[in-house]
Amino acid sequence: MTTKSHKTKAAAKPTKPGSEERAKVSALVLEGMRSGLSAFKACKRAGVNQSTFNDWLNGDAALAAEYARAREDLLEMMASDLLDIADRPVGSTESGATDSGAVADKKVQIDTRKWLLSKLAPKKYGDKLEVSGDPANPLVQRIERVVVKA
């Protein structure tokens, strides 16, 4: 009877909550987010899969709290970018007219960021909807409670 030789697996990077490697990678991800990268891009730059990083977040309350703060910083940066894009002058064509293509490009950039902010932080950046009724046409008709004796 013969036995198959098994190759030994390479040592995995430490992923325990207190490991130095994990702390370094997490710090790189959070730094990337604070500099304007999405969580996905920040994870990619730090060399970790986003699903792995999400597992770390689920298992470490302190890291999750830092991630929440980094996400808030990222959203604030996106909101600031909206103002920068809006305030940036629009170029002109050779004839001196306003470049309509540049205006359309600006509009797409602004609308995309506004939409994304309204979805990622609806309480802060979403549209405020006030639902109220007209006294003549109320939203809810009168509800009467009927109690039946048994």
Image: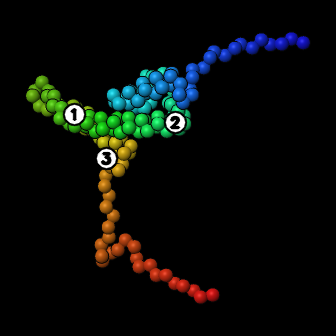
Closer to us: mark 2 or mark 3? 2
Which residue position holds label 1? Answer: 84
The answer to whether residue 71 is above or below residue 121 is above
Residue 100 at least partly seen? no
Q: Is 124 displayed left or right of 50 in the figure? A: left
Q: At label 2, which amino acid type do we have?
A: Asp
Query: Residue 40 at what x, y percent from top left?
Result: 44, 30
- Residue at 86% in and 11% down: 2
Q: Is 20 displayed left or right of 97 in the figure? A: right
Query: Residue 127 at what x, y percent from top left?
Result: 31, 52
CA distance separating discs 2 and 3: 28 Å
Give the class, few, some or many, for how many residues have Cα within 10 Å of label 3's Cα (few <14, many ≥20): some
- Residue at 48% in and 21% down: 47
Q: At label 1, which amino acid type do we have?
A: Asp
- Residue at 38% in and 38% down: 69
The answer to whether residue 132 is above or below residue 79 is below
Query: Residue 26 at what x, y percent from top left?
Result: 46, 27
Looking at the rendering, in which quadrant would you find the N terminus? top right
Q: At label 3, which amino acid type do we have?
A: Tyr
Residue 118 at least partly seen? yes
Q: Residue furthest left?
A: 96
Which residue position holds label 3? Answer: 125
Q: Are marks 1 and 2 in contact (CB under 8 Å)?
A: no
Which image quarter: residue 111? top left
Residue 60, numbered circle: 2
CA distance separating discs 1 and 2: 36 Å
Query: Residue 36 at what x, y percent from top left?
Result: 34, 30
The answer to whether residue 2 is above or below residue 18 is above
Q: Secondary structure at mark 2?
A: loop
Which image quarter: residue 101? top left
